Image (cartoon, rainbow, N blue to C red):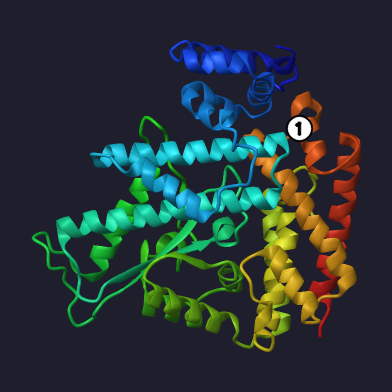
Amino acid sequence: MRGLSRAEHPDAAVNEFDRFLQALTRGGRLISLLAQNKDVVALVALILGAAPRLGDMLARHPQIMDGLIDPRFFGAMPDRDELSARLTATLADADSYEEFLDRLRMFGQESLFLTGTRILSGTVSAQQASTAFGDVAEGIVHTVHDLTARQFAEQHGLIKGQQTAILAMGKLGGREMTASSDLDLILIYDFDHDHPDSDGSRSLHGAQYFARYTQRLISAFTTRTNYGVLYDIDMRLRPSGRAGPVATRLDAFADYQDNEAWTWEHMALTRARVISGPPDFQKQIEELIARVLMRPRDIDIIANDVLEMRKAVADEKGENDIWDLKYAAGGIVDIEFLAQYLQLIHAAEKPGILNVNTMQVYDNAVKLGVLASSDAEILRPAARLYQNLTQVLRLCVSEKFKPDTAGEDLLRVMTRAADAPDFSAVEARLGETQAEVREIFLKLMQARP
C-alpha cells in the first residue's frame, strides 16, 4: 500500500489493485507465487501506481502476470524469430475469425505489458523498447495481411497478377514506436491491367476490389472485441490524404510522388518502409521511393517549406511547454524535420544519407560531411533524451504531463530514464537541450551550402 500511495491518483491505483486481487482469487496459483516473491509484488505496485494503462490490463487479464513470474522475464528481449514463434503458437488452434482477432489482441496486449514493465523497471533502453514494440507490430501486420488476403479471396476470388504490400510510415516506419503509437500505413497494390476483374463468385473490379480489401484489413485492426482494439490505424499519409482512395495502385503512387506530392509528403516518405508483401513487389516499391528521394531539389524551396510547416505546427499545437516533448521549440519535431530536410537536400549527391531512423540519419550525415560533428554531438543526445522520456510518458500518461501533480513513482522513473540525479535536474537539462536544438535547427535551415 505504501507503493500505491505514491501514485498520481492513489485512490484509482488502490481500486485497480482491488480489481486485480479479486481476479486473482480465481487463480490460487498466482496468489501463492506472489506471496513468495516480494520483488514481483513491488513491481505490481509500481505498475498500478505509475502506469494506469498497464494497471488496467493487469486488472482485466491477470493471466499476463505469468510473463512477469517467468524467470526469463529480465533476460534478453525476444528477437523477431522468437516473437514470430510465440505469435504462431498463440494463433495455432483458433477455430473462428472472432477467436483469431481475440488472440491477436491478447498477444499484442501481453507483449505491450511485458515491454512496458521492462521500461518501468529500467531493464531495457528506450531503443530496445522501440525495437520490441515495432517487431510485435510488424509481426501482427504481416499476420493480418496474410489472413485477410486469404479470406477476401475466398469470397471474391483473385485478380490476375495481383500483389499487395503494406508500407509503414511514421513511428513504425522509423523504428521508433512507443506503447501508444498508432500505425501509419499505406496499402499499395498492382495487377494485370488487361484483366481487372476478380475470378470469384462475387467478382469485384480492380480499384473496388482493393478498396474493399483494405477496409477489411483496417477492420481487423480496429474492431473492438472483448480484448479491445488491436491498433488504431492512420492512413492519412496516403496520396491525397483523406480525399484519396484507401488503397493506391503502384503506378498511381509513383505518379503522385513525381508530380503532385508536397515537400512535407516527401519528408514523410523518408520514413517509409515496406513491412509486408512479396519480395519482388517490395523491391519495386523501395526502388520507387529511393528514386523519389534522390532527385535533385532546390535547397531554398525545401528550407522555406520546412520552416513554413514548422511554424504552422507551432501555431496549431503551441511550442512553449517544455514537457510537450513532441511540439516544444527544439523538441522532437525539430529533430525529425531537420533529419528529413538533410535527406531531401543531400540524397541526390549522397544517397548514403538515407535511412528511416532519425538517429541513423544523423550518423550518416556526419560520416558524409554534411553535418558538423559539434552539431551532431548536441542532436544525438537530445534525440536519445527525448526518446527515453517519451517512452515513459507514452506508457504512463494519457493526457498532458504536469510535473506538479505527477506521482512520486512516475517522477522517479523519469529521473532514472534521463540518467539524472533528481527531477529538477531533468527539467533543467530538458530546457537547455531544447534551446540548443532550436538554435541548430534555425542555423541549418537558414544556411546555404
State the residue at coordinates (55%, 62%). 173
Q: Residue furthest left?
A: 201
Quarter holding residue 94: top left
**Left or right: 394 in relation to 66:** right
Q: Position of residue 31 (x, y in %)?
A: 54, 14
Q: Nearer the viewer, residue 371 or 404?
A: 371
Q: Is residue 206 left or right of residue 51?
A: left
The percent coordinates of residue 7 (x first, y second) are 71, 21
In the rendered image, is residue 325 in sight?
Answer: no
Residue name at image x 79 percent, y 80 percent: 370
Q: Residue at x 34, y 47 (%)?
A: 219
Q: What amino acid is labelled 1 in the image?
A: Lys
Residue that badge 1 annotates: 402
Instruction: Name the residue at 50% across, 36% down.
Output: 110
Q: Is residue 324 above or below residue 436?
A: above
Please state which of residues 22 and 380 is positioned toward the viewer in this rendering.
22
Is residue 28 at all visible to an observer of this figure?
Answer: yes
